Amino acid sequence: MNHLAKPSFSHYLPFLSWLKDYRRQDLSDDVFAGIITAILLVPQGIAYSILAGLPPQLGLYASILPPIFYALFGTSRTLSVGPVSIAAIMIASALTAPAVSALGYPVQSALILSLESGVIMLLMAVLRMGGLVNFISHPVLTGFTSGAALLIIGSQLPQTLGLKTPDCGIDVACYTDYIQGFNSVTLLLSLSALALLLLFSQLLPTILKKMGVKLTIITAISKCGPLLTVVLATIAVSFLTNKGHSVAVVGVVPSGFPELSIDAITDSLSQRGKLLLPYAAFIALIAYIESVAIAKVTANLRSEKITPNQELIGLGAANIAAALSGGMPVAGGFSRTMVNFSAGARTQMAMLIAATLLAIAVMYCSPWFTNIPKAALAVIILVAITPLVKIKTILHTWAYDRGDGIAEVVTLLGVLALGIEEGIALGIILTIASHLRKTSQPHIAIVGRVPDTEHYRNIKRHHVQTWNHLLLIRIDESLTFANISYIEEFLSTELKRRPNTHHIVLIFTSVSDIDTTALEALESLNQALQAVGKTLNIAETKGPVLDKLQKTDFLRQLTGQVFFRTEDAVKQLG
Amino acid sequence: MNHLAKPSFSHYLPFLSWLKDYRRQDLSDDVFAGIITAILLVPQGIAYSILAGLPPQLGLYASILPPIFYALFGTSRTLSVGPVSIAAIMIASALTAPAVSALGYPVQSALILSLESGVIMLLMAVLRMGGLVNFISHPVLTGFTSGAALLIIGSQLPQTLGLKTPDCGIDVACYTDYIQGFNSVTLLLSLSALALLLLFSQLLPTILKKMGVKLTIITAISKCGPLLTVVLATIAVSFLTNKGHSVAVVGVVPSGFPELSIDAITDSLSQRGKLLLPYAAFIALIAYIESVAIAKVTANLRSEKITPNQELIGLGAANIAAALSGGMPVAGGFSRTMVNFSAGARTQMAMLIAATLLAIAVMYCSPWFTNIPKAALAVIILVAITPLVKIKTILHTWAYDRGDGIAEVVTLLGVLALGIEEGIALGIILTIASHLRKTSQPHIAIVGRVPDTEHYRNIKRHHVQTWNHLLLIRIDESLTFANISYIEEFLSTELKRRPNTHHIVLIFTSVSDIDTTALEALESLNQALQAVGKTLNIAETKGPVLDKLQKTDFLRQLTGQVFFRTEDAVKQLG
């Protein structure tokens, strides 16, 4: 067999690699995890589609075919693909944009968003652009997530009070009036739901742990909180309605599945499709970044491997599947994936089981969904989303790296003040600009010899030996168009400060490349030094850099010499 | 006197610094250079305004007040500010854009371009954005200039044949018909002009040099070529017209000066001003970059100093002066500055004299300009512009650095195929993208000890001593969000290839910073290694990096140790 053959089937269909070693024990683990994840998916699916401003079934449909497609093409064994909160608020932002909302038919728009973000991911995979996401730094991402979470909190709090979204702007008096219109029955329901959720997520695990219950069992029990909350709240609603109280509920959820439809494809070619494209691009970007981030966390814990480009294919396929089966855009959910993982999921079989259970629920249980109170769903979202507002991380970042801290805070404020898409765009621009600025001011050190050694260190930080007519300069980055002006400026300032310098030695320990612009600058520097009778020397030049320079006239025209080690330069010129 | 006082007057008015030491000899040198430069300015001013699609006087007016303002505020002593070819073709591109040309009144648009590019430069000065131009690399600039020069050649060739611009698209038959409409008298005139120009620029200097004539005299004589060509061609035209031949001429040039007018300021607030703004931004950018580039060349030759930010003020003031005095946008001209410099100009006094001579010419000689044949001006432009098509440089770049070569060629083709502004925008995007890509793949070397020394070198390039359970990895760049994924990937691959590794030592000789994203990645790496019983160590960490790390938990949680030198790590772990 030729081992250099084309990538195997299992490269493009990663599930084959786990399927061939699949064992009985894996199945029982996966079945258990699948059930737990399904129990979480039902309330999340309904809650996130309402958060997105869509009918509840779009979140449920998004929990069936998309995870199946991800299971076939994705590389993470435990990622739970489906509706997620951050994507939901981004969908809401797109659907409420004036131009989009003027077109009406939000469901149609949502399906186009699914399709377009899926296609964008596949395109990114083809162009091998998976690495580009590295240009969104963690601080920008944290700022974005925290900002989006705050927006979600702001959108859900009124629901818990039985209020509509306020329309007060900055009129404080208006808010006072507004808040007084709260529904006390709804508030009571919300507080009870909150208590139940906190009981399951915080108190019960602690108690069970003390009782020595197995960890997966604890996870299973604690993750039933949301479903139990929904069930009890729904029962409470029937009771309250009979008593004449009115509580906002989800409403009718159609039974069974929509027909698979390619309408989204034809629709996307319309004006609506063009309008939605930039929103889809941002959704694709964020969905991809967040999915890969959480996929990496769980993969690292089990020494499995995530292939970013294949992830684009998996997530792209999942989103296209969402579009064709009537679902909202999907991504890998952070909390749900952690639940799936800690409930013991071994492979994507768990998600296949969860999807099957969801399909059964959609077919047979949808009448039960009608009376789920929106307030209970809002509380579930609030409990899930609050940890995403990472105040502590932001404070830490601020203390560690001021530039990163500023980027984080500006992105957060950008999301709140300008909007979701504007915030993330601002963050990306900031990151790239600060990266350019940083890389255009490389670290440069004037060095001297540590006495009685062959080591050379920064004269500012160490007591070192120096020579009057010899200037040893270590440049700590590759020389490029971006930083060469700064380097020229540095050299010219130092030469003016040290008029007795006769030989300049540039130490290239850290120089991995010299681009055309930098080469031209070195050539001018060499000529300028020649004109005033000084010499330019280079030392510690790496092999590839020397190979490249040998193709030019630079080394031949060099007024000084090329030294292997700094020590050699000092011995000869010092 | 307090030396830490505010910047002195001469900081903002750089001419004060040369004026206070001004001597008699300087004056005689400057007068001579000023006359030569004025002789060049007259035909250039007329030719470049016609190239821009404007009446000839806009180029002449641009040669009077703008250089005077530059002389007051600019830092170069020899830069000749006035109409330049590249800016002219950019103006032509703006004026012929459908939306702009639909508004009519090209002169009004040109004045707005002058004003807006001047204001943009001043704004850049205030925001201290002079350094931003470093993000246009030399290859992109060469590609842009070569492309623009080719466009200029394409626009001027028809003039030399007495033809209008062709309107054939890709219809070859059409071109055949088109070319047959050439005017033989005009062609003859063009060829004679070309012969005369080449005689003065190439042949005569060689002969005079052999005869031992002084270099400044040779420069002076050779630079009279264009004016003499214009004079002789104009005389020839009068002669030819009398004989009944028709040759396209410049036409009436109004005598005297236009009144100073602030119309441009009010006009710029209109729809027209908004439309022209992006064009003005590109003109400002290119005018600034090219001016500083040539200013640096002449300044280096005399150990003078250019202050980029003050250049923005000088050029900005010059462009605003152009707008108020009815002139087209200006910049420092490459060839004209070299002429001014080699004719012996010591200071901007030379340009003040040239501007005075131009003013006299505009007042008393404009009737003589009417019959200048356009063909002669086209030949002057062609001779001046052809050297800007830098085929040789492009080939050299291609050989030296493939990435730079591609950027250069793509920018050139972009200018030709997409247009001036699109080409330069493409070049800038390319440069930033390639910079991001490069900096996201830092050089990483696995190192070993050079036997019997304390030096550590790349195992791929040197015969070095290594240890089975010890992996020494030198990372040659700062650790940031942009490159940390690549580094993680590298480490995980190497660890898989070397399962016996027990201690990993990261050598931070070249690491000047670790940002938040990279710190988080190091923390995960440390945890992952701890989980499999391996240790992470760092060595040769620079002071500022260590200071920063000390603010975090990283060093406390580190599974291994922090070593001062790699040698220490090897002694203890090796």
Image (spheres, coloured by chain):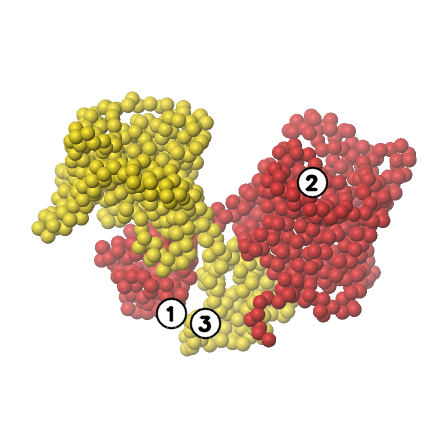
Chain colours: A red, B yellow
Q: Amino acid at mark 1?
A: Glu
Residue lying at 27% horizontally and 30% vertically, measured from the top left: B56
Return the residue at label 2: A108
Quarter-wise, where is residue B185 in the image? Answer: top left
**Of marks 1 and 3, the one in the foreground:** 3
Question: For the residue labelled by badge 2, is the local secondary structure a helix, a strand or a loop?
Answer: helix
What residue appears at the point 59 percent right and 40 percent down from the top-left corner? A274
Relative to B451, is A109 above or below? above
The answer to which of B252 and B574 lies nearer the viewer is: B252
Binning the other alpha carbons within 10 Å of mark 3 as few (below 14), some (14 to 19) or many (20 upward) gives: few
Secondary structure at numbered mark 1: loop
Do labels 2 and 3 touch, CB within 8 Å? Answer: no
Q: Which residue is mark 3?
A: B460
In the rendered structure, are the residues bearing label 1 and label 2 in contact, judged by CB atoms less than 8 Å apart? Answer: no
Furthest-left residue in view? B211
Lateral position of residue B361 relative to residue A495, left or right: left
Q: Which residue is mark 1?
A: A454
Q: Are marks 2 and 3 on the same chain?
A: no
Give the amino acid at mark 2: Gln
Disc 1 to disc 3: CB gap under 8 Å: no
